[in-house]
Image (cartoon, rainbow, N blue to C red):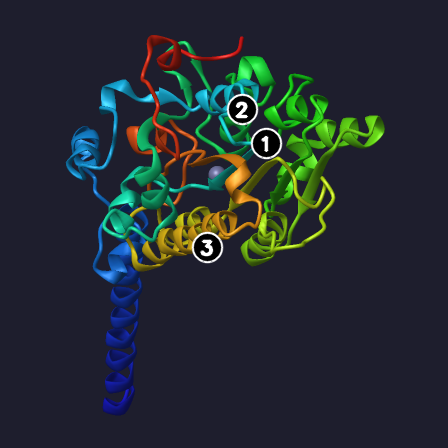
Amino acid sequence: MTAKDKKSKSFMKSFLKTIITVVAVLLVIMIVLQCVGFGALFGLYEPKRTGKYADELESYGVFDNTYDEALPQTVIYKIIMDHFNAPLAEGKTVKKAIFLGFDGFRADGIKNIKDDPESAIMYVKSLGGLYHTFAGGIKGEREQHTSTAPGWCSMLTGGWAEYHGISNNGMSKNDKETCLTALAKQGHASSFTVSWREHTSVSYKPDIQLAIKNGLPVEYNHEIDDMATYYQVLKYVSKPADARKTAAEDPDMIFFTFEFTDHAGHFFGFGNNKNYYNATLDANKYGYDIIKTIESRSTYAQEDWLIVISTDHGGTGHNHGGQSIMERSTWLAINKKLDITPDLLTFENK
Ligand SMILES: [Zn+2]
């Protein structure tokens, strides 16, 4: 072997060594990022103090019940039905309701908007209240995944999975009625507007078929994204002077979901990375605009509106579905004050 060969061999050796070291370092970085969430890239870490998570939520000073008095998310069905079944207040001629769903809006995302009176959540709280709620069923008894399909279905039907048939994503609901179907049967035009495909292709397929075959006044819309959802809902709620709208164009009950936060959570991590932070602001900005459009309706003075905003689940890392406090803790903003009775604390359709 010549001196030149020796030199080239030792160069190859050290080159390979460098490559192996670089790959190993990259692997370690990938593993660390996977554990702490990619939010770490932006200098903002997800809180890992799960034991103190409830204390952290309480420290914002914006909730109108204690964490220990968290309501089951199933109460939303009861609140909506009670609103329509209660007698009309003096001077009002019609009941209306809108349920704004912010998918995967983790409870600690509230701190991002708590000082902004022009955020949907804080504005609605100023009219009524903001309450701790929980997803995932009754712990140790009737648990269900803290996932999208079971979460919304529990809010819309008033029961947990045993009642409505959806314990995880990928399942279709049984024949238990949502508030939309129940209200449509009472003659109230209702609407359901979403962009997550599974809602219309799987979970609510039986309800959609039932509504079409029986001529029930519930309109199900599958939109391509959040902006399309926003425009559709804006179309429902806007009512300039002299506008002529049919009942279907001006539904009494409106339900829709925004995916801003869920998408950001799955991609960048649920928590306080920059993208998730921006998603919490977007949901609130467009939600606020919808609520202000309602208040500018030409017929608003004669209408009794119930406005509720909630989320289906929290999240941890890049996912959700489990029973951790960060996944189970949810919240409810409502434009009417709630009386936290034992009835509400334990409400569920069985
Ligand atoms: Zn979801």
Please provide percent x and percent y for residue 303. Answer: 54, 37
Give the class, few, some or many, for how many residues have Cα within 10 Å of label 2's Cα (few <14, many ≥20): some
Q: Which mark is residue 289?
A: 3
For marks 1 and 2 on the same chain, the one whose residue lies earlier in the sequence: 2
| Closer to us: 74 or 9 | 74
Please provide percent x and percent y for residue 127. Answer: 34, 38
Check the picture and name the quadrant holding the N terminus. Answer: bottom left
Check the picture and name the quadrant holding the C terminus. Answer: top right
Task: Place residue 139 in its image quadrant.
Answer: top left
Q: Is residue 33 above or below residue 208?
A: below
For marks 1 and 3 on the same chain, the one whose residue lies earlier in the sequence: 1
Please provide percent x and percent y for residue 321. Answer: 43, 31
User: What residue is shown with label 1?
Assistant: 93
Give the class, few, some or many, for how many residues have Cα within 10 Å of label 3's Cα (few <14, many ≥20): some
The residue at label 3 has a CB less than 8 Å from ligand 1: no
User: What residue is shown with label 2?
Assistant: 88
Q: Is residue 213 above or below residue 9?
A: above
Q: Dot 3: what SS?
A: helix
* Camera-nearest label, 1 or 3: 1
Q: Amino acid at mark 1?
A: Thr
Q: Residue at x 27, y 53 (%)?
A: 116
Q: Amino acid at mark 2?
A: Leu
188 relative position to 83: left or right: right
Q: Amino acid at mark 3?
A: Asp
State if disc 2 and disc 1 touch (CB < 8 Å): yes
Task: Place residue 193 in its image quadrant.
Answer: top right
